[in-house]
Amino acid sequence: MRILFLGIGVFDKGGISRYCRYQIRALRELAGAENVNVMSLFPPGPNDFEEPFQADYHGRGIGLGSEGSYLANGANRAFAMRPAIVWSSHVRLLPAAWAARMAAIGGRLIANVYGRELWGRWQWAYRRLLSGADAVVSDCHFSRDFVVDDYGVKPERVRVIWDCVDLSRFRPQSRRTDLLEQFGIPSGAGLRYLLTLGRMEQATRYKGYDRMLDALETFKGNPNVIGIFAGDGDDRERLQRRAHEMGLEHKAFFIGSVPEAMLPDVYNLGDMFALVSERGHGKGEGVPLTPLEAAACGKPIVVGNEDGSREAVIDGENGRVISPRDPGAMRDAIATILLDDENRKRMGLAARARIEAEFSYEGFRNKTARLIDDLLKQDRGTEAEKIG
């Protein structure tokens, strides 16, 4: 079985690229690495994963020339290799995927969907292309329901395959006080750390870093509450400046981009993790990977209730699901989780247990295998009908 995988990006540290790398790993294990041809629209860059990732082709990123070359190259590859499956990793790649599918002559089209790109400005352009895919893979039930209701995709064609976590890497460990010292963060037995991690860009303000600063401000009188902001981007400087203006320079610490090898240690610096996103035009999440990785490290997680993020949490069991529109919700979560040692420990154990049960790589690969098997069974059934 040959598969042509059309990636929007496979080298960078973004959530979609991480999801795709797990997907490619599963496909290579299932079909054999030699039978999976991987393309990436975006090229390698300076802020990518430190470990190299094998791709058979990469473009130059967003742009008419690059995307035109990507489409033509994909069609040529499909015609030459005749894949059984053309796999599109992003709705932006659907035109290229359709061209490759036609060139494959008989190949099936599977398309990934996630979050905010589904309800962005190009929604009208993707609707017809997505509804014609043989199968749609959604990273959450929220996006699944959206493509069924708004795009007209038949419900039976949509599979929800939640993101996954490498449980051997992301696991509870002792806090590294040397890392706190390295980042200039105070340490002490009575201190409690609220952690967030992600891209700090103007386009991703919906992730809620300002909300976390607002919540920390309400604890200015409690020196035991410390906020750690991990990640980088073009909005980081503004956030740091705002924290200083709020008088939080000794309470909110920005540690910048985190090397992949250090990521589990950074998650284990925190006592609780928060990423409370809001949904709107061009805003919102599927199921973001960072809360899942934090939960795998035994941290209670706090997420928003407006998008797929809420699927990461069973409210009150392994964390909290709160409204991003409620200014007091994050403050209350800090008070009831971060500052309640017994409750936090209980939720942390539940957080790890749920990741093991619902978000393991093995489960992710098995769901991917079932999808492919079901799709190819349909082909075998159709061929049998023709022969009969």
Image (spheres, rainbow, N blue to C red):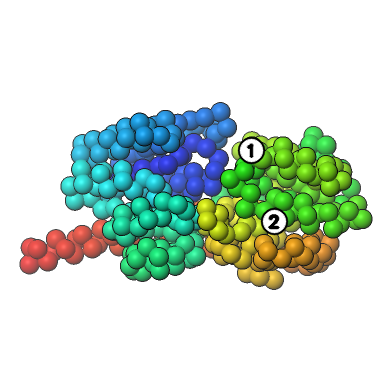
**Position of 342 relative to 264 (above/below):** below
**Position of 339 relative to 117 (above/below):** below
How many discs appear?
2
- The image quadrant that residue 144 belongs to is bottom left
Q: Residue at x 7, y 67 (%)?
A: 388
Residue 170 in sight: no
Residue that numbered label 2 is attached to: 274
- Type of amino acid at the residue the image marks with label 1: Gly
Q: Residue at x 56, y 28 (%)?
A: 46
Residue situated in front as seen by the camera: 61 or 172: 61
Instruction: Please rate how many residues cluster around mark 1, counting C-alpha atoms within 10 Å: few if below 14, some from 14 to 19, many from 20.
Output: some
Q: Residue at x 12, y 66 (%)?
A: 385
From this viewpoint, which residue is outermost toward the left? 388
Q: Residue at x 35, y 57 (%)?
A: 127
Q: Tag 2 or tag 1, which sits nearer the N-term? A: 1
Q: CA distance from mark 1 to mark 2?
A: 18 Å
Instruction: Please rate how many residues cluster around mark 2, counting C-alpha atoms within 10 Å: few if below 14, some from 14 to 19, many from 20.
Output: many
